[in-house]
Image (cartoon, grey):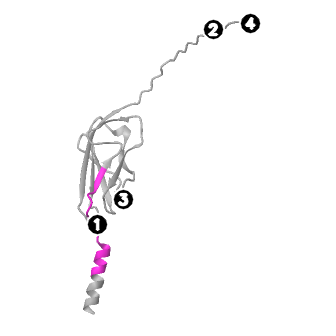
Amino acid sequence: MLVFSLLVALLAYVVSAQDCSGVCKSYGLDFVDGGNYYQNSASTANFTALQDFSGCQSDLADNILVDPQGDQYLCNSTPLTPDGTQQQIICPIAKDQLTSGEYSIIVLSNNGQCAPINYIRSFQLDVAPQVTSKIPLTVIITSTSAPATST
């Protein structure tokens, strides 16, 4: 009976164990580390960003936006799986409350039962009203015609 119990326990452990052979990575899709980006200061929409993950276990990532003054905004959590799936980060600050400067997104997760992750993507934001310019277009058409002749 003891041997049977040990086999059942071992089987349960093997079935529940996660494969930790891969390295869990986070990728910014629209805000990449070291980039410079524009945000419309007339927009009242919340700040959002896209990311995806690869090599991770089934878990959630905590996402934190850090502004140029060092203030932190706890954004929504995003799933680490499935690999290569766009995950949207939504932060509790409207674009019209942003200021120009260096921002960071911090991504933290236990990564299931595997190695925890902590990634930081830092980037510059230029925050200003959107400007639309109209450029007049002039088209010159030259036409030449010749009278029809009959032969």
Residue lying farthest bottom? 1
**Label 4 neighbour load within 10 Å: few <14, some 14-19, many 20+:** few
Q: CA distance from mark 4 to mark 1?
A: 86 Å
Which residue is tagged 3?
81
Q: CA distance from mark 3 to mark 4?
A: 76 Å
Q: Is residue 53 above or below residue 68?
A: below
Quadrant of the image for the N terminus?
A: bottom left
In the image, what residue occupies the spot 30% across and 42% down?
32
In the image, what residue occupies the spot 27% across and 40% down?
123
- Amino acid on which the number 2 mark rests in the picture: Thr
Which residue is tagged 1?
19
**Label 1 neighbour load within 10 Å: few <14, some 14-19, many 20+:** few
Q: What x and y, as percent, mark residue 105?
A: 28, 47
Q: Choose mark 4 or mark 2, whichever is in front.
A: 4
Which residue is tagged 4?
149
Q: What x and y, as percent, mark residue 7?
A: 28, 84
SS at circle 3: loop
Q: Quadrant of residue 40?
A: top left
Q: Choose mark 3 or mark 2, whichever is in front.
A: 2
The numbered mark, 3 or 2, whose residue comes first in the sequence reads: 3
Q: CA distance from mark 4 to mark 2?
A: 16 Å
- Amino acid on which the number 1 mark rests in the picture: Asp
The numbered mark, 3 or 4, whose residue comes first in the sequence reads: 3
Q: Are marks 1 and 2 in contact (CB under 8 Å)?
A: no
- Amino acid on which the number 4 mark rests in the picture: Thr
The numbered mark, 4 or 1, whose residue comes first in the sequence reads: 1
Q: Choose mark 1 or mark 2, whichever is in front.
A: 2
